[in-house]
């Protein structure tokens, strides 16, 4: 059984992520302890709300050290929603730029769309050979709730991007060696999200 830590730093969607992983048979620990987070088979970094607030919480639990050590050791990490956004270089909200964890190149900016936030079910376009989306049909929908996203293009030689469209194309998921992340909420995406989480657990 895979041992998974969900990083507890004050984010709001932690419990739903824990329950979704437990339903798939994972041994899940909710913890802010750096040693626990570094040593687990898999680490999940959830996130909802403002980029700057999430970064403040992550700094409190030494997330930069935790993620750097895990990635250097090839130990899998999964970011969810703002937990994906903070992996990038910076986030810009209301004209204020906040440094991110800078594990991936790119900036999180407001979507250019007629309706904000992007809330509801949407299809995605994964790259060929995706591990996260293995066995997921092309018309499958995932649940999104966000106003900000990473635009495709900048620095994508360093990660494989899954794209979605809401007013414009944006990065819906990334895969970069042991580092994976989704802008949507797999834990709120029914069978589709369960398949994606099962695929991630299978990679541990």
Image: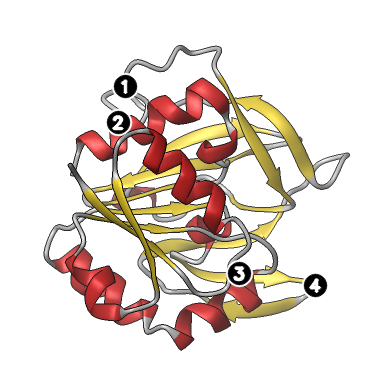
Residue contact at pointers 3 and 4, CB within 8 angstroms: no
Disc 2 to disc 4, C-alpha distance: 36 Å
Marks 2/3: CA distance?
28 Å
Around disc 3, counting alpha carbons within 10 Å, would you say few (fewer than 14), some (14 to 19), or many (20 or more)? many
Q: Whole-percent x and y of residue 36?
A: 25, 72
Q: Which residue is mark 4?
A: 94
Distance of mark 3 from mark 1, alpha carbons? Answer: 30 Å
- Mark 2 is surrounded, within 10 Å at the Cα level, by few (under 14), some (14 to 19) or many (20 or more) other residues, namely some
Q: Where is residue 60 drawn, in percent x and y?
A: 47, 87
**Quadrant of the image for the N terminus?**
top left
What distance separates the C-alpha of mark 1 from that of mark 4? 37 Å
Mark 3 vs 1, N-terminal side: 3
Q: Which mark is residue 187?
A: none
Relative to residue 74, is residue 203 depicted above or below? above
Q: Check residue 91 in the rendering and tell me which mark sits there, or answer none.
A: 3
Instruction: Answer yes or no: is residue 153 visible.
Output: no
Q: Nearer the viewer, residue 165 or 140?
A: 140
Residue 161 location (% of width, % of height):
41, 40
What residue appears at the point 21 percent right and 64 percent down from the top-left corner? Answer: 71
| 2 or 4: mark nearer the eye | 2
- Where disc 3 sits, the SS reads strand
Q: Secondary structure at mark 2?
A: helix
Q: Nearer the viewer, residue 121 or 24?
A: 24
Locate the C terminus and report the quarter of the image it occupies.
top left
From the image, tell me which residue sits under label 2: 199
Lower position in the chain sequence, tag 1 or tag 4: 4
* Numbered disc in front, either 1 or 2: 2
Query: Above or below — where is 29 with respect to 193?
Result: below
Label 1 with label 2: CB-CB less than 8 Å: yes
Q: How is the image coloured?
A: secondary structure
On screen, residue 99 versus residue 117, left or right, reads: left
Which residue position is annotated with label 1?
134
């Amino acid at each position: 059984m895979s041992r998974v830590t969900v990083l507890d730093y004050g984010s709001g969607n932690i419990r739903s992520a824990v329950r979704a992983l437990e339903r798939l048979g994972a041994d899940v620990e909710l913890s802010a302890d750096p040693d626990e987070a570094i040593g687990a088979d898999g680490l999940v970094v959830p996130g909802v709300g403002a980029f700057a607030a999430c970064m403040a919480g992550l700094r409190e639990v030494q997330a930069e050290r935790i993620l750097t050590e895990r990635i250097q050791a090839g130990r899998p990490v999964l970011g969810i929603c703002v937990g994906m956004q903070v992996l990038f270089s910076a986030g810009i909200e209301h004209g204020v730029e906040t440094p991110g964890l800078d594990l991936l190149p790119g900036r999180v900016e407001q979507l250019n769309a007629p309706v904000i936030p992007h809330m509801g079910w949407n299809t995605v376009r994964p790259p060929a050979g995706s591990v996260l989306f293995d066995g997921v049909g092309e018309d499958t929908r995932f649940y999104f709730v966000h106003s900000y996203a990473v635009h495709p293009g900048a620095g994508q030689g360093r990660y494989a991007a899954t794209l979605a469209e809401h007013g414009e194309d944006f990065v819906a998921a990334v895969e970069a060696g042991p580092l994976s992340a989704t802008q949507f909420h797999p834990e709120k995406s029914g069978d589709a999200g369960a398949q994606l989480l099962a695929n991630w657990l299978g990679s541990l």
